[in-house]
Amino acid sequence: MLEVYTLVARVTESKSTVLLQGESGTGKELIARAIHANGPRRDKPFIPVNCGALPDTLLESEMFGYEKGAFTGAVGSKVGLFESANGGTLFLDEIGELGQAVQVKLLRVMQGGTTSTKVDVRIIAATNRDLEQLVKEGKYRDDLFYRLNVVRITLPPLVERREDIPMLVHHFLEKYATGTAHAVR
């Protein structure tokens, strides 16, 4: 974890895209928030997006927005999360779950896109999947992978961080004991 903290400290001031890899529950979102909170974008939005929780069509609308009448049911315009995160950080969690069509559109935006709306957004992506293996299998675009993999931080699983367990137990006991104590009274 000391290596992780060293990388985090080095990357906070840069504009580089960061790819966080690690098993579920290793703290990828906490690391993303730490990078944002300690960098020059700290006063701008931090917007987390769980790419695995939404179907691709809904995810596309959420990330990129749409104009009134763009599709059936689009009764108004909607600002996308990229535009909402302007000046800040967009945290793309579970980036390995993106379908091919959304991968193409995300790549286009990361390359500068062809839209008239310009945004300044730092992207931090996270996955528990092996993106390099997905690229080899043809399930993930290699060009998108290389755009995301500018700085890679791999979080070790908890089984390799046994010394962290007492601190985590204490943290969760503090967090949930106060809520439980009030509920019992």
Image (cartoon, helix red, strand yellow):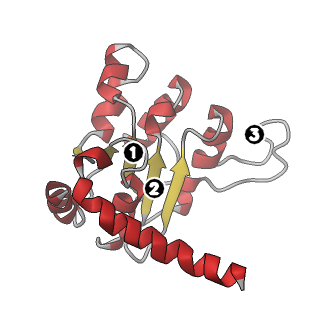
Callout 1: helix, strand or loop? strand
Q: Is residue 76 left or right of residue 53?
A: right
Distance (Cα) linking label 2 and label 3 = 24 Å
Front residue of 65/2: it is 2
Can you identify the residue that label 1 sits on?
126
Amino acid type of the residue tagged 2 in the rendering: Leu
**Residue furthest top in the image:** 137
Q: Quadrant of residue 152?
A: top left
User: Mark 1 packing: few (<14 Cα in 10 Å), some, or many (20+)?
Assistant: many
Q: Is residue 3 left or right of residue 148?
A: left
| Closer mark to the observer between disc 2 and disc 3 | 2
Count numbered badges in the picture: 3
Q: Is residue 159 above or below residue 129?
A: below
Amino acid type of the residue tagged 3 in the rendering: Ala
Where residue 117 appears, as percent x and y from the top left, is: 52, 53
Please give the name of the residue rendered at 42% of the width and 61% of the height, measured from the top-left corner. Answer: 89
Can you identify the residue that label 2 sits on?
90
Can you identify the residue that label 3 sits on?
70
Amino acid type of the residue tagged 1 in the rendering: Ala
Please give the name of the residue rendered at 27% of the width and 61% of the height, measured from the top-left corner. Answer: 164
Taking the image as drawn, is residue 60 in sight? Answer: yes
Where residue 167 appears, as percent x and y from the top left, is: 32, 68
Residue 3, label in figure: none
Callout 3: helix, strand or loop? loop
Distance (Cα) linking label 2 and label 1 = 11 Å
Please give the name of the residue rendered at 37% of the width and 55% of the height, measured from the top-left corner. Answer: 27
Q: Quadrant of residue 79?
A: bottom right
